[in-house]
């Protein structure tokens, strides 16, 4: 019988995690975890065929991987997924640095920061938003990724995605980025603070 295709193998975000599982657990156990995660992902998608893009691209796979690792290596899931989140975020950070190294890109980004902030926060609950051509700050008080992970029974799975965000956002040139809180880690908000660099401005 032909084995079903594992969608995780096609995921830009998660496909390289399989290599990390092999490094940590060996090929046989890693393959079992990966296949289990792929099966769980299919189950999530079948149960919610009309799920939004963020759930399908990020939350469903994260939850499936978290559950599969915990099943085969109890107590390891949070550490494994957070470590991978950081690694993936660092790879994306390099891409962001190359893009924002192009002449004029940082200035263009700040010129349209109001629109960018609106798009990035779409679907999230926010408060205390301040956006100018010099700074952008907002507190995210509700997150669809965290909410969906809770519904799936693995709220901790959202931390992998949170770790990605914390890394790749530091790759944007022309901006000082800080975040000290995380909803996924149990805080009351995600406190995003972005300030244009190379110009005089007040501290956060």
Image (cartoon, rainbow, N blue to C red):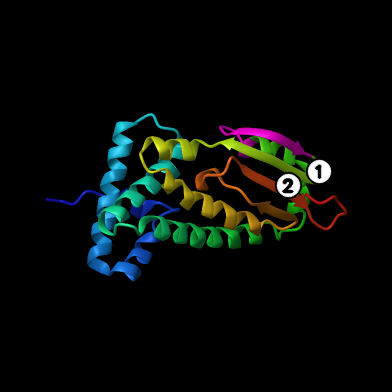
Tell me where the magenta segment starts and ends, as one range. Answer: 119-131
As drawn, the label of residue 109 is: 2
- In this view, 181 is above or below 198: above
Q: Earlier in the sequence, mark 2 or mark 1?
A: 2
Confirm whether the magenta stretch covers residue 124: yes
Q: Nearer the viewer, residue 134 or 70?
A: 70
Q: Nearer the viewer, mark 2 or mark 1?
A: 1
Q: Secondary structure at mark 1?
A: loop
Residue 77, image x and y in percent? 36, 56
Q: Are marks 2 and 1 in contact (CB under 8 Å)?
A: no
Relative side of 168 to 131, left or right:
left
Task: Say which residue appears at 73% left-offset and 47% top-offset.
Answer: 109
Q: Tell me which corner region of the image, top left, top right, bottom left or bottom right, holds residue 15.
A: bottom left
Residue identified by numbered label 1? 133
Q: Residue furthest left?
A: 1
Task: Say which residue appears at 43% left-offset and 47% top-offset.
Answer: 156
Relative side of 116 to 37, left or right:
right
- In this view, 145 is above or below 98: above
């Amino acid at each position: 019988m032909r084995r079903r295709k594992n969608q995780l193998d096609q995921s830009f975000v998660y496909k390289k995690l399989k290599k990390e599982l092999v490094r940590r657990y060996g090929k046989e156990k890693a393959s079992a975890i990966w296949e289990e995660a792929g099966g769980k992902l299919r189950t999530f998608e079948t149960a919610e065929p009309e799920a939004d893009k963020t759930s399908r691209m990020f939350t469903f796979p994260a939850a499936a991987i978290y559950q599969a690792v915990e099943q085969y290596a109890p107590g390891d899931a949070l550490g494994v997924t957070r470590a991978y989140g950081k690694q993936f975020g660092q790879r994306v950070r390099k891409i962001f640095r190359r893009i924002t190294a192009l002449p004029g890109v940082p200035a263009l980004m700040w010129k349209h920061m109001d629109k960018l902030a609106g798009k990035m926060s779409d679907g999230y609950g926010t408060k205390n938003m301040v956006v100018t051509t010099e700074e952008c700050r907002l507190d995210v008080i509700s997150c669809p990724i965290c909410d969906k992970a809770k519904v799936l029974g693995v709220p901790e799975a959202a931390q992998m995605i949170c770790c990605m965000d914390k890394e790749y956002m530091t790759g944007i040139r022309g901006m000082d980025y800080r975040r000290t809180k995380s909803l996924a880690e149990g805080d009351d908000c995600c406190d995003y603070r972005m300030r244009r660099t190379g110009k005089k401005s007040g501290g956060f």
